[in-house]
Amino acid sequence: MKKRKWVYLQNPKKYEISCDLCGGNNIEWSEYEGMIWCYDCEKDTRGNGGVFDGPIPINAAGFFGLTFDRYYFKENEVRRYEIRGNKIKYVPLCCPIKP
């Protein structure tokens, strides 16, 4: 499995993702791309897709409290999504996060 380079800032539960093995929501983003970690199963698993299983009305998502901003590990920075034309770009908020 390939290690993640980034995670969404919000917990996977916020996106209605759940464990595909036990159906639980005691989960967090896995260290591996495309996976979640289930604390109950103690396994990395794909999870159920939640809002990512269908078309996402990206502009309306904010009304439901969703954000698609990401934290990038190597750069130690948060990047906000911006819609530019018909594409989504991720741009740094400001500065790297200091430990």
Image (cartoon, helix red, strand yellow):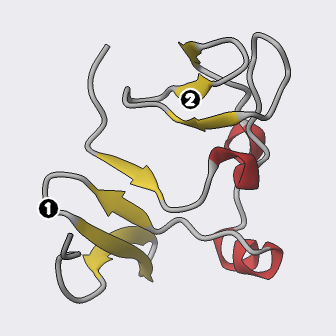
In the foreground, 69 or 29: 29
Left/right of residue 47 with respect to residue 6 in the rendered view: right
Local crowd size for mark 1, using a 10 Å CA cut-off: few (<14), some (14–19), many (≥20): few
Q: Position of residue 73 (x, y in %)?
A: 23, 52
Q: Residue at x 37, y 31 (%)?
A: 31
On the image, numbered disc 1 is attached to which residue?
Answer: 75
Q: Residue at x 20, y 63 (%)?
A: 76
Q: Is residue 55 visible?
A: no
Image quadrant of residue 93?
bottom left
In the foreground, 25 or 58: 25
Query: Relative to 40, does residue 71 appear above or below in the rendering?
Result: below
Say which quadrant the C terminus sits in: bottom left
Q: Position of residue 98 (x, y in %)?
A: 18, 76
What amino acid is labelled 1 in the image?
Glu
Left/right of residue 95 with respect to residue 47 in the rendered view: left
On the image, numbered disc 2 is attached to which residue?
Answer: 36
Q: Position of residue 68 (x, y in %)?
A: 53, 65
Query: Relative to 69, does residue 28 appear above or below in the rendering?
Result: above
